[in-house]
Amino acid sequence: MTGEQPATSSPAPAAAGVPDRARGLARYTADLIPPGTVLVGLARSPYAHARVSSIDIQAALKIPGVLAALTPADFDDIALGHQGADEPVLTRVARYVGDGIVAVAASDQDALLRGIEALHIDYEILPHACSVDDALALDQPLHPAFLDNVARRFSAERGDWEAAQKRVSTWVEGTFQTQAVPHAYLEPRATLVRVYDDRLELVTGTHFPSVLAETYGEIVAGWGARLEVVTPDIGGSFGAKWEHPTHLVCLAFAHRLRRDVAMVLPRRDDMISGRTRVAMRIQMRIGATDDGELIAKETMIWADNGAYTGHGPSVTLAAAIRMDNLYRFSALNAQAQLIYTNNVPSECFRGFGSPQSAFAQEQLIDELAEQLRIDPIELRRRNAVQPGDTTLHGWQVGSCGFNDCLDAIKDRIQTHRRENPMATSDRYRFGYGIAGATHAISNRGYDHRFDRDMMSLAVEPNGVLRIESGEVEIGCGTVDLFAGIVADHLELDRERIRLVLGDTATVPHGLGCFASRTAFFGGRAALDASRRFAQLCGRLAIDIGLPADTAIASVIEAAVTANRTMELRVTGSYEPDHVTVPDESGYGNISPAYTYATHGCCVRVDTATGLTTVVCYWAAHDTGQVLNPQRARGQVVGGVVQGLGFALAETTLVDDRGHMQNPGYLDDRVATFADAVPIECIFTPTFEKEGPRGAKTIAEPPIIPVAACVANAIYDATGARQWRLPMTPEWVWRSLCAKGVLAPDRTAD
Amino acid sequence: MQVTLRVNGKLSEVPPSFIGRRLLDYLRAELGLTGVKEGCGEGDCGACTVLVEGQPMCSCLLLTGVLDGREITTIEGLPETFLAQFSAACAEYGAVQCGYCTPGIAVMAAWLQAGGSEVSAQPITKLLEGNLCRCTGYQQIIEALSALQ
Amino acid sequence: MPPAKSPALRPSHLPPVELYRPADLGELLAHAADGVHLLAGGTDLVVWASQCGEPRRLAWIGSIDQLQTLDITSDRAHIGAAVTLSRIVRSGQFRSLAPAVVDGAAVVGSVQLRNQATLVGNVCTASPGGDTIPALHVHDAALDIVSAAGDRRSVKISDFVHGPGQTGLNTGEVVTGVTLRGLGQREGSAFSRFTQRNALDLAIASVAACLSFESDGRTVARAHLSMGAVGPTVLDADEAARSLVGHPLEPARLRNCADLTAECCRPITDHRASADYRRQLVRTLTMDVVDAAAERAIPGWLAVEAP
């Protein structure tokens, strides 16, 4: 995937660090679109499920400024989807409201809008299903190959279930419903395609430029062209920006028109055709002995795939089994199915499936604690996974600080309780909650060929050290982390380092920025590259006649003078050797290390309105050694606030015709400044011998326990268990009505 | 109709094709001021915030033609002394992640530093209620802005 | 199933707009007569135009000086159609005169949006949940309207808004401003709303109250209650308000009043909230808002009221 850069190509943008970002100098895809670029737009289906019976583009093509239109026929042999190729680029059968039918390219926005409005599309409406139950009952498959609308089934049975059952004295159980949530990144999806002689360059914010280059590269090769992918700065993604039909629409127009083309989705379009968290119904029961030994856990999941598959299978499997690895169960039984519906396609979203399953599991652990009359932290402590364990799912636990996290939260809650006697009244109730979490770092099962990262270091003629990585800066601090590791190791001035990330024409392979893997895999590759670079500098120093231990900066300076900077180029890599590709049931040591967390919070519930206010929040994390405390805290606080949105506010609402009713920030209710809550971030360090300088990672774990933690606090405050997300004021109020815990004179009608 | 704006201190005559379009489009497409970001186009995120006669507004909801004779300031036009302070505070407190919301917040911070407020004693969290950030959870931005005041 | 034909969903980009900037009221009326939409702050209109592709002809009212006036006397205020919400929020004088209106104006959108949006625009949008409308009701506001022929009329706000997005404005007519009654002696007003997040949100229920007390400082002399987002328009809760008049504001009476507001509202169930939850919120908000209005009328009234 590497190759020389043609003279016509604009230089790859250097990824911007914090100071540049703060000055507004970061360049996102839409900022790179020059005036005069051909603009692309889509006509989308107004029906949740309909067969397109005819398309007439003639009137649109006659509009001045309209250059071309593409229809499903132009993409008949292409289907997208990393884990189930089922998403057409433009579709003959609309499977959700917003599915793209016809694409138009025009020389300006006015012509583009007129062109789209002039299209004639006829539909034959088909029965639709916007819930998993409706989809299972629908006598019509949404995809011909899946007659029962079940896209994927998973089953994982571990341990001796029969024997384990006999030891259980107390079971707790419940059915929990989690919701679809849009990722709501600030930068809407944008795509720019630049045309060179025999090459198309796709410029777009994505988690994995190398995978896009591979996937789209094959398609583009079929058109007789080559493809490179450039990832500029990315305005957030959180698990949304992977393959997307709009990429191929733009590539096809660019190839056909031989002109640069671009498409920036308006926020509304982005929301209706973007992606959401996978909504799940989770039926779970957990059994324990009287003295609080967790024995058995059974999980059934019905997951809403939406219209197309995305990473739904991995997410569903993760939800079915990952959180099991937090405790020493004796037997586990998980069954899950991923079901096609006529909703917007669901996707992975920070935390993968674990925020969903944690919502169920960590509430049931609290239920058990109450029934067994054991303190909920103590119950977790007694059963916590320990360093050196191999879990029932095959996770080989290296460093593990779960107990320390539990202790830290216990301490915070005790102190808070002591120092803030809560004025509980008829109307306002206060309560505390906790929840635990574990997470993997990358996933060996993601790409069966390998799980690795590479990094090249090269000295430019002026002596600047260039870091080249296939990873991208998605907002987690990759730029600062890589530059920091290299600068530290080589004792170089940060100002003399430049990063080129995610440009497949120039950088070595990296699997991508997802699954909390970049700091770990990229960090190890950075260390390896730095070591190799130091050795190379030692050799060059001797060659030039300097002592072998000359400072790297001086060797680089000497190389500039001697015009020998070209010789200073190395590539380092990291690929863990003790991980295993999981089997179909998810069994395997999927990750080189695992992270742990416990969260605690204090809430105030207004029984008159059901409004839950988070008074105080504590997040304790075992992320190994903390490389950059400020960035790590940023990931924790940001993750917790996203988690609070998931817990209390955010959702995707669909009416009975399948139209999304809240496709914008106004009704999606992403937290504002005014919703900020005080969050204390606590790191309980372990030393992970596999990690870069003992570190693990922190991007995803902070969102996992939040909904469960808040739900447990609401229960503590009111006695009303929360079975459904989001726990909006209205739903909490309803749960209070059902429980009969309302303030005097305020009852449901 | 003739429309002339003063953008970041420079007079610029708006071409007729931009008079009936959004200020955001004019600033980005015509003047190349790409520090002004479009997050939602509906006034709900504040990424496109600019100062009009010193007051913050959403450039996605303003038609360029209504601003004849007005002074517009984007992040590109904020004083270097302020940008240096703001940038340093962001780095120190970890106030920037993806950075897409940051230009809008920088403009609000400059307004605050110049004494901007609606009524007295409003907290930063009220004054910045119109600027969404999906990454940081706000805490570190609040710390950075407090340090700047 | 039968074949169907429905327009495809279009990208929500704002189409280029034909923009007029009338210099005086006469020019504005000419545009209005010609079917051109009026553009005030644009914080709703530009969003709709982006979503629907319409309207594409707009006349901006902001360059007409007489629509920019904010006149405040000892007992009245006149707010010109181009006066922004932030001018209202920032005016100490206005706050003393009509605090409930400031409560409402201060929670619309954000600092940025309040710098753009106008009070009259908020009224003319005619949303059942418009944040300034209940407060304008309890301040007996009236819209000042001028027709293409130059005829002027004044319409009570409760008669002006007919339904969601519908007003009593005839073709060619223009709202030049709104006039409201200021607080008298021992009189207070307040507005509160319930939203699911603390900013940038739309009310799922709201209540405004205006209360005056007799010279004993205990007995309610006059009361006006108005509710938002719980009916096709903002609704006055007249019976509930009357139940307070002539009596001291005791807890039981206040609770009874809250029940009456909850009974007389006409909420619907939509994606933001269900009807019965809205009713519950009206009950709670009424207690809070009457309390706040009384506090403004007679600071420390709770202490006065005992035993």
Image: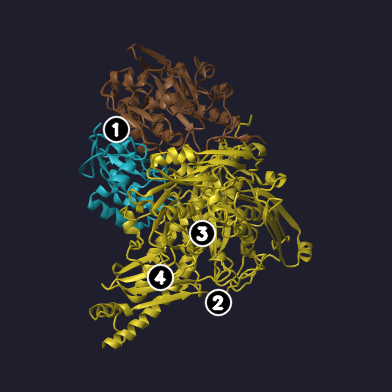
What residue is shown at x 40% (from left), y 73% (from top)?
Answer: A456
- Position of residue A455 relative to residue A609, above or below, is below
**Could you tell me if the residues under marks 4 and 2 are in contact, i.e. CB atoms within 8 Å?**
no
**Could you tell me if the residues under marks 3 and 2 are in contact, i.e. CB atoms within 8 Å?**
no
Amino acid at circle 4: Gly
Q: Can residue A426 be seen by looking at this rendering?
A: yes
Output the chain of dot 4: A
**Could you tell me if the residues under marks 3 and 1 are in contact, i.e. CB atoms within 8 Å?**
no
- Which chain is tinted yellow? A
The image quadrant of residue A612 is top right
Q: Is residue A192 left or right of residue A713?
A: left
First along the sequence among labels 4 and 2: 4
Badge 3 is on which residue?
Answer: A700
Residues marked 3 and 1, same chain: no
**Secondary structure of the residue carrying numbered label 1:** helix
- Which chain is tinted cyan? B
Residue A355 percent location from the top left of the image = 57, 54
